Amino acid sequence: MAKPTDEQIRERAHLLWQAAGEPEGQQDRFWFEAERELTRSDPALNSDEKSGTFTE
């Protein structure tokens, strides 16, 4: 399982922070949320979704 890089987490956390209205003092919240999202979206963790197993 590939862990997201710090740069990937930083970029996603910044987007989340902006979307939330740029609140002060909540850096950890956005960092951990970004890390969680990126880990969940790892293709190695969701191989069934990427293989087309699910249809709509």
Image (spheres, helix red, strand yellow):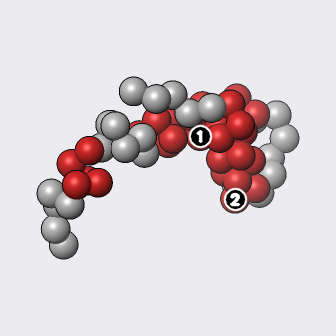
Locate residue 45, reporting x and y percent.
Answer: 32, 37
Q: Amino acid at mark 2?
A: Ala
Q: Where the N terminus falls, by quadrant?
A: top left
Query: Would you say residue 29 is visible in this rendering?
Result: no
Locate residue 46, reporting x and y percent.
Answer: 30, 43
* Residue at x 46% of width, y 29% of height: 2
The numbered mark at residue 34 is: 1
Q: Is residue 50 above or below residue 42?
A: below
Say whether marks 2 and 1 touch (CB < 8 Å): no
The one nearer the camera, 26 or 44, is: 44
Q: Where the C terminus falls, by quadrant?
A: bottom left
* Residue at x 84% of width, y 41% of height: 24
List the single residue furthest toward the right. Answer: 24
* Residue 6 lies in quadrant: top right
Q: Is residue 8 left or right of residue 43?
A: right
* Residue at x 56% of width, y 33% of height: 4
**Label 2 to label 1: alpha-carbon separation:** 12 Å
Q: Is residue 44 above or below residue 3?
A: below
Please give the residue where the numbered disc 2 appears in the rendered image.
19
Locate residue 9, reporting x and y percent.
Answer: 65, 38
Other-residue count near label 2 (Cα within 10 Å), few / some / many at <14 / 14–19 / ≥20: few
Locate residue 11, reporting x and y percent.
Answer: 71, 46
Q: Earlier in the sequence, mark 2 or mark 1?
A: 2
Q: Amino acid at mark 1?
A: Ala
Query: Could you say whether the residue bearing mark 2 is in a helix, strand or loop?
Result: helix
The one nearer the camera, 39 or 16, is: 39
Q: Is residue 22 above or below residue 4?
A: below
Query: Would you say residue 36 is visible in this rendering?
Result: yes
List the single residue furthest toward the bottom. Answer: 56
* Residue at x 20% of width, y 60% of height: 52
Query: Could you say whether the residue bearing mark 1 is in a helix, strand or loop?
Result: helix
